[in-house]
Image (spheres, grey):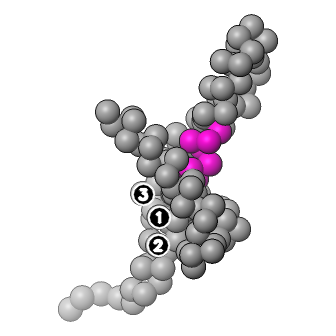
Amino acid sequence: MGRTLKRAAAFSALGRAITAGARGGPSIGKRLAALPRMIKATMKGEYDGGLRLALMSAAMVYVASPIDAVPEALLLVIGLADDALVITWLAGAVLAETERFLTWEARRESVIPGTVL
């Protein structure tokens, strides 16, 4: 059930992201521009997106893997359908995570660094 909810959330995020620019949300360009900053903040340990970035990286490797070319040759439609599903999930996951990162980044900029006495 958890996987189904995550998959549905990724697909709905993709739909929201496509129409976000018209509704005043972050545009796709702004979200994609935030991707390198998100990776850098995650690598520094400032942002908690490590597991999500790992899943997105695994999806990219799956789609680009030459090992996956065999099912396409043998199963045609089914082999291509699984790639299309993974690509759609990946697009939704990237857009949802970059939106979450942009929100985190905006909140972080409003905090004044210092120490509590």
Kindly identify which residue carries mark 2: 103
Which residue does the image show at 66% across and 65% down from the upper left? 28
* Residue range highlighted in magenta: 87-94
Q: Residues within 10 Å of mark 3 (few under 14, many from 20)?
A: some
In the image, residue 77 sits, relative to residue 51, either above or below, namely: above
Q: Quadrant of the N terminus?
A: top left
Label the magenta part by its dominant secondary structure: helix
Amino acid type at circle 2 is: Thr
Whole-percent x and y of residue 112? 39, 90
Which residue does the image show at 58% across and 62% down from the upper left? 17
Specify the label residue 48 is tagged with: 3
Which residue does the image show at 37% across and 41% down from the upper left? 5
Whole-percent x and y of residue 116? 24, 88
SS at circle 2: helix
Which residue does the image show at 54% across and 61% down from the upper left? 16
SS at circle 3: loop
Q: Residue 100: within the magenta?
A: no
Whole-percent x and y of residue 110? 42, 87
